[in-house]
Image: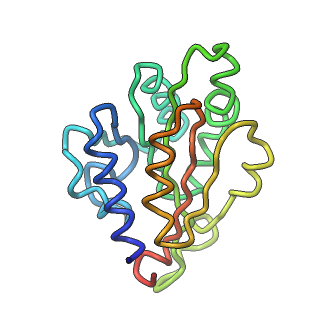
Amino acid sequence: MKYANELKRSMNFLGQKSNSVFIGQAVEVAGTAMSNTLKEVPAEKLYEFPVTEEMQMGVTIGLLMQDFIPISIYPRWNFLLLAANQLINHLDKFNEMTKNKYKSKAIIRTSVGSEVPLHPQSQHVGDFSKAFKKISKTLNIVNLKKPEAIFLEYKKAYERKDGVSTILVEYGDFYNTK
């Protein structure tokens, strides 16, 4: 069981769901290690976004309001910081704000950038999981450190019925080492 293979397996599982859609940077085109995990996802489910992180999270919320399960991909936690307004002030409180009208949820995929073989500098390797756990009321934040947990956590995020969105945090250095 390899880390990257389990990520690919998880994306293929999600890609087969009729209500799933994948949005983000390097989703339709190569550009990050995450891109390689999407190669077998049906092309009509992949929507490439420019570097507009906050808008992407707003679109993510709009998609879940239309009964999609969006898999919103931010290649690094450092990029997801730019969507913090939509993430914490809207998605995190969405059920409360709508008086539980919506029980849909989003799956947010992000990563702590790899440092080997080339360190990309500090603006690409942040792990803000603990900080976001403290400021979030409802978001489920899962750190994917073990390959055997990956598929189970993505499946759980998709199948949950409580309307809670999940941030799944991957580790770039594990793609080739675990």
Residue 42 picture location, percent across and down: 19, 45
Give the quadrant of the C terminus: bottom left
Relative to residue 65, is residue 114 depicted above or below? below
Could you tell me how many numbered marks the image carries?
A: 0
- Tell me, what colour scheme is on the image? rainbow
Residue 151 picture location, percent across and down: 42, 59
Give the residue drawn at x 33%, y 37%: 21
Give the residue drawn at x 42%, y 75%: 175
Relative to residue 79, is residue 106 depicted above or below? above
Give the residue drawn at x 52%, y 28%: 58
Q: Is residue 119 left or right of residue 21?
A: right
Q: Quadrant of residue 66?
A: top left
Residue 145 picture location, percent across and down: 57, 71
Q: Nearer the viewer, residue 111 or 122?
A: 111
Residue 159 picture location, percent across and down: 46, 40
Q: Nearer the viewer, residue 42 or 53?
A: 42
Relative to residue 120, is residue 94 depicted above or below? above
Q: Is residue 129 left or right of residue 169?
A: right
Relative to residue 47, is residue 155 depicted above or below? below
Give the residue drawn at x 42%, y 42%: 71
Q: Quadrant of residue 97?
A: top right
Q: Quadrant of residue 67?
A: top left
Give the quadrant of the N terminus: bottom left
Pick out the residue farthest to the right: 134
